[in-house]
């Protein structure tokens, strides 16, 4: 009688081990597929831009000029912002001009203007921010004219 009992206990333990291994394999396969699909479907992972140089000029209105280098896949510039050093907004332009569709491994000139009066002391540090249609941002620090 003890023999039958011990064999059934061994079978039960082996079955539990098989169920645990099967569940862990299924969980691994599911998570690997889920994380892989999220990772590869996000286009912003392939977009990388950098502002190589930028400045602001003032004649009748303020014009921001930025040379943007595309280090990733093809992208499009959607907006330009000028911020104080503490990230508060000076002005924003969601209709910039210039080379808005920058091919990979190339540089494009982007410019945006602002017609409103801005009271900022000349030489104040500001940040120029360029934003792509995917939401990828690049910043460049310069001084207000």
Image: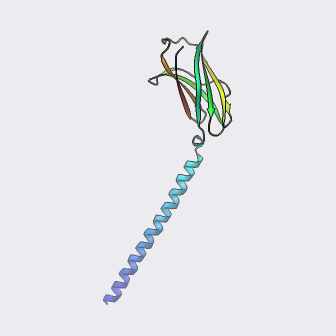
State the residue at coordinates (55%, 31%): 138
Q: How is the image coloured?
A: rainbow
Q: Residue at x 41, y 77 (%)?
A: 14
User: Tag count in the figure?
Assistant: 0
- Screen quadrant of the C terminus: top right
In the depicted structure, whether residue 144 falls above or below residue 31? above
Query: Residue at the location (52% across, 61% down)?
Result: 29
Q: Position of residue 83 (x, y in %)?
A: 50, 22
**Quarter where residue 42 is shown:** top right
Q: Is residue 12 left or right of residue 130?
A: left
Q: Residue furthest left?
A: 2
Q: Give the side of residue 7 with respect to residue 100, left or right.
A: left
- Of 14 and 122, the residue lying toward us: 122
In the image, is 141 to the left or to the right of 17? Answer: right
Decide: is 28 above or below 73: below
In this view, which residue lies farthest toward the front? 52
The percent position of residue 67, horizontal first and vertical second, equals 62, 26
Asked where in the image residue 33 lies, by quadrant, the reply is bottom right
Looking at the picture, how far across and down is residue 92, in whole percent? Answer: 55, 22
Q: Quick one: quadrant of the N terminus? A: bottom left
Q: Position of residue 104 (x, y in %)?
A: 67, 37
Check the image and report above or below for 121 versus 76: above
Q: What residue occupies the far top of the structure in this picture?
A: 60
């Amino acid at each position: 009688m003890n023999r039958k009992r011990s064999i059934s206990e061994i079978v039960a333990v082996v079955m539990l081990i098989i169920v645990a291994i099967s569940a862990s394999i299924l969980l691994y396969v599911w998570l690997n597929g889920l994380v892989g699909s999220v990772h590869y479907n996000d286009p912003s992972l392939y977009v990388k831009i950098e502002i190589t140089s930028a400045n602001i000029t003032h004649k009748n209105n303020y014009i921001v000029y930025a040379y943007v280098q595309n280090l990733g896949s093809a992208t499009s510039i959607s907006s330009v912002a000028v911020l104080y050093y503490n990230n508060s907004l000076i002005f924003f332009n969601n209709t910039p001009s210039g080379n808005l569709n920058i091919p990979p491994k190339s540089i494009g000139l982007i410019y945006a203007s602002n017609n409103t009066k801005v009271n900022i002391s000349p030489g104040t540090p500001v940040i120029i921010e360029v934003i792509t249609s995917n939401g990828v941002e690049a910043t460049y620090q310069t001084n207000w004219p």
